[in-house]
Amino acid sequence: MDPANLRLILVADAPSALLEVCGVTLLDRLLRQAQRVGLREALILSATPEAIRGEIARPSWPRGNVAVEVEARAPGPITVEELSRNMGDARPAIVVRGDIYCDIRLLRALAAQTNESVVLDSAPGATVASSATQTQSPSFGPAHLTKTFLQTRLPNELLSDALEGAVAAGTIQAIDAALFPRYIPDIRRDVRPFCLGVSPDSRPEIEAIVLNSAQKGTLDLPAYVHGPIETFIISYLCRTNVSPNEMTIAAFLFGALGTVCFATGHFVIGLVIALIFGVLDGLDGKLARVKIETTPKGELEHALDLVLEYSWWIAIGWGLRRTGLLPSALFFAGLLVGGEILGQIARGHARRLTGHLLDDFTPFDRFFRRIAGRRNIYVWLLVIIGCWSGAANAYRTIAIWSAASGTVHLVRAVLIHLKNKPASAPVESA
């Protein structure tokens, strides 16, 4: 079903729906998710309408494409009749409590359904946090409902009871978060989706889940050091007004300073900047995922990264040649950049062919990614080998490692191509 044909109905009261998780209120978080799912209209039913209207009045561009209305309702659990009355036309609706945290994949799956369905979590205590005593499943999960379904229930029946009864009777499809597919290609790892009620006591656990779900997987070795540092910084940065795009620009300008240092022969200062940049570079994407502030423009950050990385390698080569430390440095610069480009082409072809990242095909690919030529690997090698035997030997090493890595990726891409290419049609005999 086209999500634009659905309406979002939130049952949200203050203060529970206005509790902040990683710098974003639960209500705003759900509306941001709705926009990314493709929903365009939202009705909020609230026993505290003025407080909710105050939250909606706050500027929030990540939900700016969702038209929101707020209607007053009596306090207490919502009934089947009340929900049916507020559904208005015959369009289906996604009905959600406003005081929950729900993984966007579950909401996206719900919006794609053609029949009535509800999200539940058969193992809500299995969180990533060390203790799960406070975390619990909400009284009813997000549901994809129609008026036809509601008309089959008793008018005064609580919606939570109606959904529970329908699941038990098998008259409504259940989407179990505990059994939902966990792999996320964009971050290259398995992440267990949750749909959980949130309270002030359980908020630390929910925030741990949010921060954990923003961490990319299949890491290179340096990223095992960077990851915890990034998460620590984001846990505080997400509570500020700093945007992911501002982080991208600041990190790029900082990295460009490293290019200047390398080109002018100030290799030590340049490497210090490069080491710090390794952490800064991961903050913008992680912040965007945590606060649901992702945009198509965020993809430009990868292009800026490539420009910056290539400028480093060329600048180091230029600086080594200019200072006389490595007269053949420009040859090695070409080898380094060429290996990187070769690897990019190979990985891109594998993904276009199969829809999966080359780094995730086999245990060998997952292992090789941890040591393959990449910016962070190169920077660490420059530091370690540079301290041991000088900048020239360090630069030669990363150039050769880049060429070797690109060759391995090319071979793996060719093997994947041969395995996945469409079979040619048989030739008919005359």
Image (spheres, rainbow, N blue to C red):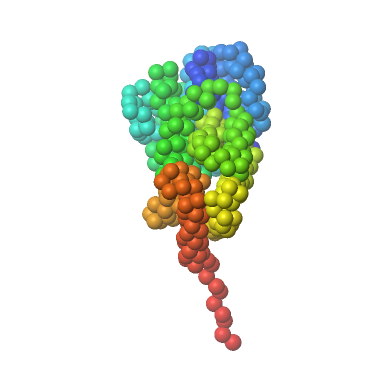
Please say if 229 is above or below 23.
below
Placement of the C terminus among the 4 image quadrants: bottom right
- Quarter of the image for residue 259 reads top right
Q: Which residue is rendered at x = 39% and y = 18% of the image?
A: 201
Q: Which residue is rendered at x = 59% and y = 39% of the image?
A: 261
Residue 116 locus on image (x, y percent): 51, 37
Q: Which residue is rendered at x = 58% and y = 47% of the image?
A: 323
Question: Can see residue 20?
Answer: yes
Q: Which residue is nearer to you in this view: 26 or 9?
A: 26
Residue 284 locus on image (x, y percent): 56, 34
- Quarter of the image for residue 43 reads top right
325 with respect to 206 (left or right)? right
Q: Which residue is rendered at x = 48% and y = 28% of the image?
A: 233
Placement of the N terminus among the 4 image quadrants: top right
Residue 347 locus on image (x, y percent): 53, 55
Q: Which residue is nearer to you in this view: 194 or 339?
A: 339
Question: Can see residue 194?
Answer: no
131 with respect to 217 (left or right)? left
